[in-house]
Amino acid sequence: MIVLVINSGSSSLKYQVFNMKEEKLLAKGLVERIGIGGSSLTHQPLGQEPIVTKEDIPDHNKAIQMTVAALTDPQSGVVKSMEAIEAIGHRVAHGGEQFADSILINDEVTEGIRKLIELAPLHNSPALMGIEACARMLPKTPQVAVFDTAFHQSIPEKAYYYALPYEISKKYALRRYGFHGTSHKYVAEKAAQLLQKDIVDLKIITCHLGNGASIAAVAQGKSVDTSMGFTPLEGLVMGTRIGDMDPASLLFLMEKEGMNTEEMNQFLNKKCGVLGISGYSSDFRDLETEANNGNHRCQLALDIFAYRVTKYIGAYAAAMNGVDAIVFTAGLGENSPTMRQAVSKNLSYLGAEIEDDKNNQRGQVEISKENSRCKLFVIPTNEELMIGRDTYRIVKSS
Ligand code: ADP
């Protein structure tokens, strides 16, 4: 089955095409600057150079049209015709309480996603634009929604309720949802494979450390807790997001700085995190370089980041009463031996011992010492493949 996977942002659209029978990537691409001028489509068939088409792309309809044209192009395309695309999988950020698994899209599902825009305005509305554009362009092709929150719907009440009055939590569905679910699930399953054990017999902590960062506790293959909450702002320190914070301090700041709610929202999402601490960059590569040059604030930002990750690992080991494997993934988790070392140095009480030589390797690799009771892994995430898998599973069984 040929599956087109789409990750739609407000001004961008990323795609990958897989032959799901062999789980083979055929092509990938990116539409940039939708609706803001200077737009382009970059299409890259597997093993070939990227082809860039610059054209005015005012909306997601045009973006999908150009994507399909690129995929069916007689020279650089990867399928013969539009009909050869047998299913489309969409990444949708927020599935609320309604969607605990990926689902075949129909009118009811579209409406459900629309209703959830309130909880994730920046993410769910572009996803919906992508879904609607595909429905217009390829009306006969089945579409599947894959939610970032779905994997975390197994989290028990005690971990997802905040200490708000219960009626308020219920009234607004104000609770922990968690995000990056597709990534946590993918790397947890991969870790079980690498351990050659059934995932139901394992306790795994997955650390998705990128610009956005979250940790999940995965017991018996199910997410039982995660650091992101009602929104992707809670938990770890991130590139520009604040993570955990005393709620009273926000009220204090709003008053002192005269910020309204929108300004505060922007501040917490865009001006904080390692960018705010360092005053230098949100990019961990810049921070590591500058810290090596003796910049105290850059080093402090890295120290605070690593310390928070280590604390969450401890919390989740406690929540699961043990841990068999800890996985590092995403931009920073996959590429920064320094950060993995900093996070892991206080984990010996869990029986997790990092091996420096192994830690300096790249790609999918175990980085713990031979006799380490708890294994440490680096596993590159692959959310697109996971979306492809779910799409294949759901369309095949529908
Ligand atoms: P997101 O998908 O949330 O935008 P990514 O998973 O792509 O984020 O991760 C981006 C982050 O990973 C950036 O802050 C970048 O600095 C960091 N990163 C990528 N490569 C390296 C590296 N070699 N060393 C340190 N950090 C890296």
Image (spheres, rainbow, N blue to C red):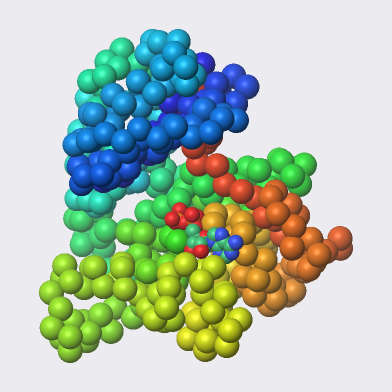
Is 292 on the left or on the right of 52, as rendered? right
Q: Quadrant of residue 60?
A: top left
Query: Residue placed at 35% from the left, 64% from the top?
Result: 233
Q: Position of residue 262 (x, y in %)?
A: 16, 67
x 28%, y 84%: residue: 249
Instruction: Using the image as rendered, state which of residue 177 and residue 301 is in the foreground.
Output: 301
- Quick one: quadrant of the C terminus? top left
- Front residue (pair 273, 71): 71
Q: Is residue 222 visible?
A: no
Residue at horizontal 76 percent and vertical 47 percent from the top = 195
Where is 74 relative to 297, above or below?
above
Q: Between residues 387 and 332, which one lies in front from this camera angle?
A: 332
- Up/down of 101 relative to 349, above or below: above
In this view, the residue in front, 44 or 160, is 44
Q: Residue at x 47, y 67 (%)?
A: 283
Reply above or below: 373 against 8. Answer: below
